Image (cartoon, grey):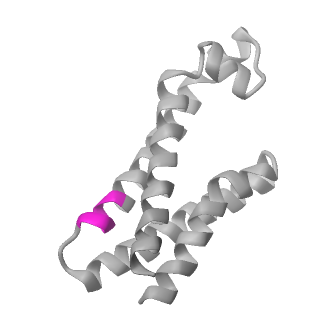
Amino acid sequence: MSLLANIFVALTALLHVGFLVLEMFLWTGPTGRKMFRMSEERAEATKVLAANQGLYNGFLAAGLFWSLLHTDPAFALQLKLFFLVCVIIAAIYGAWSVKPRILLVQGGPAIFALVLTFLAS
C-alpha cells in the first residue's frame, strides 16, 4: 500500500511539474493557447499571471518530491499530508473559480494519493 501511495504522490508531483512548464514556458505558444483556448492577445495579456501560477505549482511539486525523499518517515508523512491537502484545496478553488474539470485533473490524483497515504500509515 505504501508503494502505491508513493507512486500517486510522485504522479501528483509530476503533474505539477507539467503545469509549471505549461504555465511558465508554453503559455503564449501554440500548446498553451490551444490547451486553454486563448487568442494570442489573451495569452500575452495573461502570461505574467500564468507564470506566477506555474511557480506555485512548482512549489507544490517540490514539496511532494521532498516528502518522497525525506529519510524520517514521520516527517515525510507530515509533508505528504500537507502538500497533498494544498493541492486538493487548489483544485477545489480552481474547480469553483475556473472550471469543474480542474477538480478531476488536478485534484483526482492528489485525493487518491491522500487516501492511499492514510491507508498506508
Q: Main secondary structure of the magenta part?
A: helix
Look at the image and tell me whether residue 57 can be seen.
no
Residue at image coords 47%, 80%? 117
Residue at image coords 63%, 19%? 31
Q: Picture coordinates of residue 14 (x, y %)?
A: 45, 48
Indicate whether residue 66 is drawn in magenta: yes
In the drawing, does residue 79 fall left or right of residue 44? left
- Residue 32 quadrant: top right
109 vs 17: above or below? below
Residue at image coords 54%, 26%? 48
Indicate whether residue 55 is drawn in magenta: no
Quadrant that contains the N terminus: bottom left
Look at the image and tell me whether residue 68 can be seen.
yes
In the drawing, does residue 38 fall left or right of residue 56? right
Quadrant that contains the C terminus: bottom left
Q: Nearer the viewer, residue 120 or 24?
A: 120
Residue at image coords 72%, 58%? 103
Q: Picture coordinates of residue 70 (x, y %)?
A: 22, 69
Q: Picture coordinates of residue 59 (x, y %)?
A: 39, 50
83 vs 121: above or below? above
- Residue 27 quadrant: top right
Q: Nearer the viewer, residue 92 or 6?
A: 6
Q: Picture coordinates of residue 110 (x, y %)?
A: 57, 65
Range covered by the magenta-colored residues = 65-69
In the drawing, does residue 28 fall left or right of residue 58? right
Q: Which residue occupies the extreme top position in the image? A: 40
